[in-house]
Amino acid sequence: MRWQGQQLGVADAAALPGLEYLNGLVRSVTTPEFAGITFHEVMAKSALNHVPGGSAMPFDWTINPYRGCSHACSYCFARGTHEYLELDAGKDFDSQIIVKINVVEVLRRELARPTWLRDPVQLGTNTDPYQRAEGRYRLMPGIIDALTDSGTPFSILTKGTLLRRDLPMLAEAASSVRITLAMSIAVFDDELQNALEPGTPSASARLDTVRAATEAGFAATVFLMPIIPHLTDSMAAIDEALRRIKEAGATRVIYGALHLRPGAKEWFLQWLAREHPELESSYRGLYPGASVNAPKAYRTWLARRVRPLMRAYGLDGGAEDDPAPRAAPRSAVRYTGLAGGPGAGGTPLPHEAVDRARLAATVVRTSRGRRLGPAPADPTLF
Ligand code: SF4
């Protein structure tokens, strides 16, 4: 690893925030309760990360107490960041977890600076703050306390059901600062979820957490993303997802099609070749070469499926790439997803050919039978 065998105290310009100095590494830990996982405990230099001005992210500050994520989603866009540490973006990302053990102490110092303007802070934008490691290290309660004490509004996005542990303190904190909670649930079929996101709790367990957040007084958002071409984008799958989200009490949904960034792309395509080789040629059409985003035409097609169903279920929200002002008001920071940017646009979709015949004869209905009108077939696509 990059930090081994180098001089103490030497800045590493390529290191992740908080890992710039090699003397930050305290120890590496393995334990029987977390078989196959190594925790690298580090002393971080910083806790608040400033998002660069040119970023597509609609917020300015993030906190990431962990690097790497045992939730192990094949499509995870943060995989490439592990390569800065000379760890790989595949198995190492899932199993070599960097833990900023002093993050709370550093955060409190940063929040106490007179220059801190209490801009909204986002947690869960890079790696998951409620991944399994949080059960061992319990960093989030201290982070929540520090942000609340300083009057800083914040948002949490997670796939982790461990969020439930902190709901009582979050509910109390919400009387002092604005807090928004979002649960990410991409896959509602248990078998597919186990294959694609082997370290995550089931969709049912995550929906139960949404329910608990709602009962604790939060208007919870669900990130229905990434929607995965051919695997989770059928009318039946989207309808089931939105119905269950609504039943769990969520008020908003943000949806988005799969992104395949460098690092994640190689890993996901390996997974696809193993699990669904019949889809490989279709994905070569959807994500050719180094392209990251699904084509604009696919995203338009997806919107025509998702939006009428969201309306039918009375769910607010929209697509992750809907236009949104970067500088959201401090009192009303808006979730718009994990990544944005224009799509590749306009290419014919091998994906569409599969569904064409079915769509031509389909009327969109919710699973409760409500008729919404003709299926969203765009003549430019078929
Ligand atoms: S939970 Fe989020 S951060 Fe963790 S592996 Fe999945 S997508 Fe990546």
Image (tube, rainbow, N blue to C red):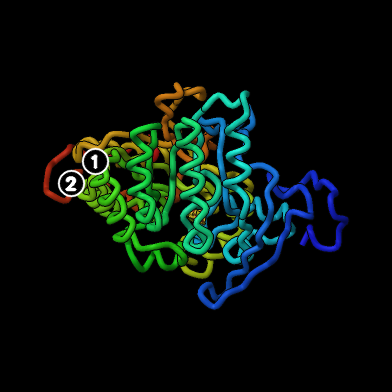
Disc 2: residue Cβ within 8 A of ligand 1's nearest atom: no
Asked whether 108 or 207 is in front, the reply is 108
Assign a secondary structure to mark 2.
Answer: loop
Measured Cα–Cα span from mark 2 to mark 1: 7 Å
Q: Which quadrant would the N terminus be assigned to in this image? A: bottom right
User: Does 86 sit above or below residue 261?
Assistant: below
Residue type at numbered disc 1 = Leu
Residue 231 in view (yes/no): no
Residue 94 in view (yes/no): yes
Q: Give the labeled residue for mark 1.
A: 309
Residue drawn 52% across the image and 70% down it: 274
User: Does 244 sit above or below residue 155?
Assistant: below
Q: Which mark is residue 366?
A: 2
Disc 1: residue Cβ within 8 A of ligand 1's nearest atom: no
Asked whether 297 or 247 is in front, the reply is 247
The residue carrying pointer 1 sits among few (fewer than 14), some (14 to 19) or many (20 or more) residues within 10 Å by Cα, namely: many
Asked whether 132 or 299 is in front, the reply is 132
| In the image: residue 275, left or right of residue 262 | left
Residue drawn 29% across the image and 54% down it: 207
| In the image: residue 13, left or right of residue 380 | right
Is the C-beta separation of discs 2 and 1 under 8 Å?
yes
Counting from the top left corner in percent of width and height, residue 84 is at 72, 52
| In the image: residue 91, left or right of residue 24 | left
Counting from the top left corner in percent of width and height, residue 284 is at 55, 53
Residue drawn 82% across the image and 46% down it: 11
Residue type at numbered disc 2 = Thr
Assign a secondary structure to mark 1.
Answer: helix
User: Does 33 sit above or below residue 363?
Assistant: below
The residue carrying pointer 2 sits among few (fewer than 14), some (14 to 19) or many (20 or more) residues within 10 Å by Cα, namely: many
Counting from the top left corner in percent of width and height, residue 210 is at 30, 50
Q: Which quadrant would the C terminus be assigned to in this image? A: top left
Q: Quadrant of residue 107?
A: top right
